Amino acid sequence: MPLNIDVQQILLHMFNLVILFFGLYFILYKPVRTFMDNRLENYKKMKEKSEADRDEAAALKKEYEDKLKAAEDEISAMKKDAEEKVTKENSARIREAKAEAEQIIVKAKQTANDEHDRIIDNANAEIKDITMKAAEKLLMGEDVSDTYNRFLDDAERSLDEQ
């Protein structure tokens, strides 16, 4: 044997090395590999779950935004309807008030005309009465200036009473 190399020793070392590799493979590599695969699978599941949760949250957000928009539209429509009702009611009340005011004006004019006619009739009656009295007194010879002064006093009193 040259160089003091023993083939049997080399084969034995190779055999020990193979046993060592298989032993380390089953003792260290396989459990570490299984652990790493499980860890990778766990991370994939967590990522999928977070993506699903994010998608669900986005869908819920969109749904709530749609509901909010629908509610705002409904509120806007209700507000518009209420404003229209108020406007219609105000217009109706204004028309009623104008009609009532016209009726009041017509009644007031009629009352004023009736009062005017009554005053004219009373004045005419008083004028006739005074004229008759004045004529009687003239015929009887009384002083006309006293009668005229009494006429004016009576006219002022009747105007003050009204």
Image (cartoon, grey):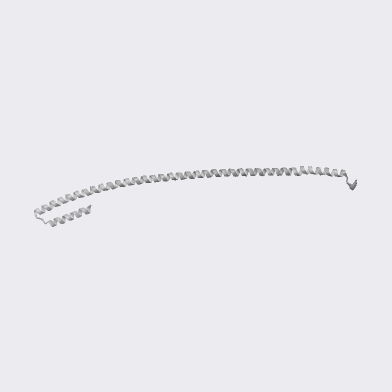
Residue 143 in the figure: left or right of residue 9 = left
Farthest-out residue, right:
1
Farthest-out residue, front:
2
Residue 93 in the figure: left or right of residue 140 = right
What is the tally of numbered marks visible in this picture?
A: 0
Q: Residue at x 20, y 54 (%)?
A: 157
Q: Quadrant of residue 85?
A: top left
Of the 4 image quadrants, the one containing the N terminus is top right
Residue 106 in the figure: left or right of residue 90 = left
Residue 70 in the figure: left or right of residue 153 = right
Q: Residue at x 33, y 47 (%)?
A: 98
Q: Residue at x 62, y 44 (%)?
A: 51
Q: Quadrant of residue 138?
A: bottom left
Residue 60 spot, x, y in % from top left:
56, 43
Residue 143 spot, x, y in % from top left:
11, 57
Residue 88 spot, x, y in % from top left:
39, 44
